[in-house]
Structure formats: C-alpha cells, structure tokens
Amino acid sequence: MSENSKSPWYNHPMAWLVFGIPFLTIIAGIITIIIANKGADDLVKDDYYKEGLATNQQMEKLNKAKIMGLQANIIYDEKTNLIKLLISPEMDNNQTLLLNLSHPLEKRYDREIILNHLVENEYVGELKDFKSANWHVRLHNSSQEWLIKGRWNLPAEKTLLLNPAQE
C-alpha cells in the first residue's frame, strides 16, 4: 500500500471535490428557494386577464379627462404630510377625488389617498407612511368617470403636473 492511501480521507483534495460540490449545490438550492419565496414578484397581477379587458375602459376615461380639459397640480408638503391638489376646471364641490400611488415594485407600499374638497378648485388629503420611489399616479373622481395618470418621483419632486393632453 502506498503512503497516500494510509492518510485520512479529508486530506485528499479529490474527496473534497466529490463530496463538497454536491453539498454546496444543495445549500445553494435551499437558499434560492428561500429567496424566491420571500421576494415574490408583485409586478404580475393575479387578475391580469381582467385588467387586460379593462384597458379599453381606461382609455375611454383618459379621453374623457382630455375632452373635459382637466389639469391637476399636486403639491406635497413634507412637514405636514399633506397632499394639496389644484384642479382645473373647477369640479363639483361635493365630489371626492381619489389619488392612487402605486409603487413600481412592491404592492404593499401602494397608497390610496382620499382628497377632500376645501375651497373652489382645491382638495387636500394626508399621505402617511410612504417609501421613496418613482410612483405611478392615478387621479380620478369617486364615480371613476375620468382618469389622469402620471409618474411622480416622491419625495424628491414636491410637485407634479398631471395633464392628459400631454400623455
């Protein structure tokens, strides 16, 4: 017998390759499964088919906003966490507006802000607990007759002008 065969198995590099590579592959697979389950992708919606069918309705709402000549200026006050909205032309005083902020990656950060009428064409709402991002913005009335969309890099940009004629 050679002297090489008398030494313990862990002293042979070939043994580490034979046992080590499959062991590390199993560990890497387990880690990949854990990461995949914790970081599930929110970009794909559960009801994607229904959303696809609703695209025509959304286009009609965008066109209605364009025909009405709607334009909205949204201002964020970081100190008070208030969103102030100036809309033209002036809306019905009893109407509540809804501002949807959709996070580009994580659905759990999405916010819906109810904007209550103050005076003339001014509305105000409170924005609580939000994360800095380049938000997808959707503004519509409570009856969802019209829609204005845009992107807002909040809080880096304190104001946003929504104009359906520029889309």
Image (cartoon, rainbow, N blue to C red):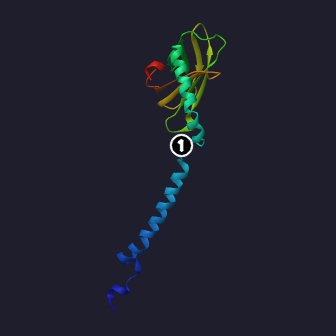
Quarter of the image for the N terminus: give it: bottom left
Q: Which residue is drawn at 56% across and 28% down?
A: 58
| Relative to 28, residue 12 above or below | below
Q: Which residue is drawn at 41% across and 80% down?
A: 9
Image spot of residue 114 (x, y percent) = 62, 22
Q: Which corner quadrant of the image does residue 47 belong to? A: top right
10 or 154: nearer the viewer = 154
Q: Which residue lies furthest to the right in this view?
A: 94
Image spot of residue 31 (x, y percent) = 50, 57
Q: Which residue is drawn at 35% across and 75% down?
A: 13
Residue type at mark 1? Val
Q: Is residue 84 visible?
A: yes
Q: Which residue is drawn at 33% across and 85% down?
A: 4
Query: Neighbour class for label 1 at 10 Å: few (<14), some, many (≥20)?
Result: few
Q: Is mark 1 on a helix, strand or loop?
A: loop
Q: Would you name the residue on which mark 1 appears?
A: 44
Q: Residue furthest top?
A: 120
